[in-house]
Image (cartoon, coloured by chain):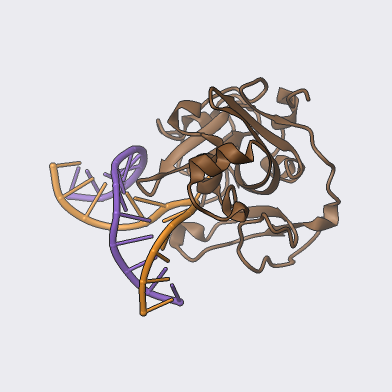
Chain colours: A brown, B orange, C purple
Amino acid sequence: MRPLARAFYARPVLVVARDVIGCILVHDTAEGRVAGQVVEAEAYGQEDPGSHAFRGRTPRTAPMFERPGHAYVYFTYGMHFCFNIVCEREGVAGAVLIRAVEPLEGIELMRARRGPVADRDLARGPARLTQAFGIARAENRSDLTRAPLHLAPGERLPVQDVVETPRIGLGRSQDGRRWRFAVRDNRWVSGPRRLQDSSTD
DNA sequence: CAGAAGATCATCT
DNA sequence: GATGATCTTCTGT
């Protein structure tokens, strides 16, 4: 299937975060192909105190300000990578963190990369996902509109199966809005266990 | 240059 | 529910 075009990403983060649910994330490497359907994502906009880019452009956050349709991969907690898709127009910081996918292809490879864990946990959680997909520092700024790492259109999930959850977490930097979109009651969603049913659209 | 915090996860009680 | 792992990045002095 054809990768999503750049126009898909060049929109507000909240719109992309919703629309990316159901899309297929694909990564081709020498080890093989892995693919999965996005079931959970989180939007980080320019105005969000919880966003890395809230206090402006730094070497680390520069990708968030650059052209939409590229990857922003960052390293955190001394051991984990997280994968974001850069949105908005160039010059406006915005990214959508991909938090969980349902494995569809290359499950054996995911198992090999993740070690002895339940299949349900292969890509449930942003750092587990990058492990399963072989996404690391080298994938920062990679172009998502073409192979090897790209998104393809997927099943159109009903809007009522998506919830928005502002203000997840406890820390100071969590005070901002962290809009999380997830497929309700989906077993591949990472959490929290209870998503507030705060709204629809 | 020191210090703190971090878009997390696995493991333990 | 709590904690440790592990190290990068940013901030303040």
Residue most toward the top?
A146
Residue B13 at what x, y percent from top left?
36, 79
Viewer-side residue, B13 vs A15: B13
Residue B1 at what x, y percent from top left?
13, 42
Q: Give the side of residue A156 with respect to residue A109, left or right.
A: right
Q: Give the side of residue A164 with respect to residue A143, left or right.
A: right
Q: Quadrant of residue A69?
A: top right
Residue A36 at what x, y percent from top left?
68, 40
Q: Quadrant of residue A68?
A: top right
Q: The C terminus of chain A appears in which quarter of the rendering?
A: bottom right
Viewer-side residue, A23 vs A89: A23
Q: The N terminus of chain A appears in which quarter of the rendering?
A: top right
Above or below for A169 versus A49? below
Above or below for A17 versus A184? above
Q: Give the side of residue A172 with respect to residue A66, left or right.
A: left
Which residue does the image show at 65% across and 53% down from the upper left? A179
Which residue does the image show at 60% across and 64% down from the upper left? A192
Which residue does the image show at 64% across and 36% down from the upper left? A106
Q: How many marks?
A: 0
Q: Is residue A82 visible?
A: no
Q: Is residue A19 visible?
A: yes
Residue A160 at what x, y percent from top left?
84, 57
Which residue does the image show at 52% across and 54% down from the upper left? A117
Q: Give the side of residue A109 with respect to residue C8, left or right.
A: right
